[in-house]
Image (cartoon, grey):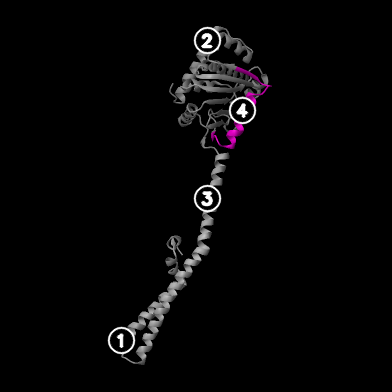
Amino acid sequence: MPADAGRLRNGPLQEIFWTRTGLLLLALLLISGASMVLASTMEAGAGKDFVNAVGSGTLITAVVGFGQTLITATAARRALVTPVVEESRRALRELSEEYRSLNKEFFPTDVFEASSEPNPAFNKLMMRDLRDTKQYFFRGFSGRHAAARLLLSHAEREVRVIIADPRDNTTVGGRTRYLLRHEGAEADFDAIQKRLDDEIWMGVVGLYLARSRCTRVDITVLADPPLDRLELFDASAWITLYSNAAEASTLYPRTLRFSEGSFIYGMERTEFLRLCNSRTERHFQLTPNTTESDFLALFEQITGWRPTERELQELTTAFHAFLQEFSIAAEIGS
């Protein structure tokens, strides 16, 4: 039977003509019709009366059988088919709702694959999430990108940042060895370590420059932070997978975006707030009223080094150069 036959048999009347009962009724009608035609050609007599009786009886049998079959099919459909169909639909709805729930709980809403060039769609969506959020949480090795995004946005928000502790040699040294393993043979340990120190210092300066865009900036320095970068907004969580060894040499690793109601979002937010409130970690705060002298003292507490005004200006210039490069590459207007 063809696959689309099921669509035709959607009622008791159609079902009759798709069964052997329907063929039997059709045969009775043909016999009745043939008998009456034959009787009309015969002369009056017992033979004609007999043929007429056969035709009339067959016709009555066909009509009664048709009605009985129609009633039986309708009753059977109501008693057997309809409940099964409704139960199947209900089960499918429940299964679909369960799958949608699982997708929301554990599967990302967006996946951005690793690339060597910035993805404009990635940055456009993240900047939209940043625009619509009141709280922005960032966890990464340095806070350069968080500071850049804050300076490129046009709203005031509460910001919490977790960065690597530059005073912990194990933290910087471990990240240096990680990068060294995935760079070419010409890579130099001291050069990579100096670059990482510069990124942390530049990130702290960037957060200072972005303080006027925030109600406050809470900074937590963490020894040996996770490799993966985390950015949390009110409605989403973004996880950049630097821990994926297969993509370690890629400038922009794979990034996953999870919605607010997902299990991943709740887990990451809980862990982030735990670290921000931990008494074993070092915590600092920037406000719009933080002066340059206050910042220099805070910078020394974070990094263990107090820059001169000239050195601070050099770091500021370096950060502005990074901001310009980032905004052009990411196609983010200021």
Q: Which residue is mark 3?
A: 93
Residue 69 x, y percent position in the rendering: 46, 71
Q: Secondary structure at mark 4?
A: helix
**Mark 2: few, some, or many residues within 10 Å (few <14, many ≥20)?**
few
Q: Nearer the viewer, mark 3 or mark 1?
A: 3
Residue 27 x, y percent position in the rendering: 41, 77
- Highlighted range, magenta: 256-284
Q: Which residue is mark 1?
A: 41
Distance (Cα) linking label 1 and label 4: 99 Å
Distance (Cα) linking label 4 and label 2: 32 Å
Which residue is located at x 53 percent, y 59 percent?
84
In-image side of 321 versus 272 (left or right): left
Q: Which residue is mark 4?
A: 272
Figure check: 302 above or below 135: above
Q: Residue reaching furthest top?
A: 309
Query: Is the C terminus in the top left, top right, bottom left or bottom right quadrant?
Result: top left
Q: Disc 4, disc 2: CB below 8 Å? A: no
Identify the amino acid type marked 1.
Answer: Thr
Q: Earlier in the sequence, mark 3 or mark 1?
A: 1
Residue 93 x, y percent position in the rendering: 52, 50
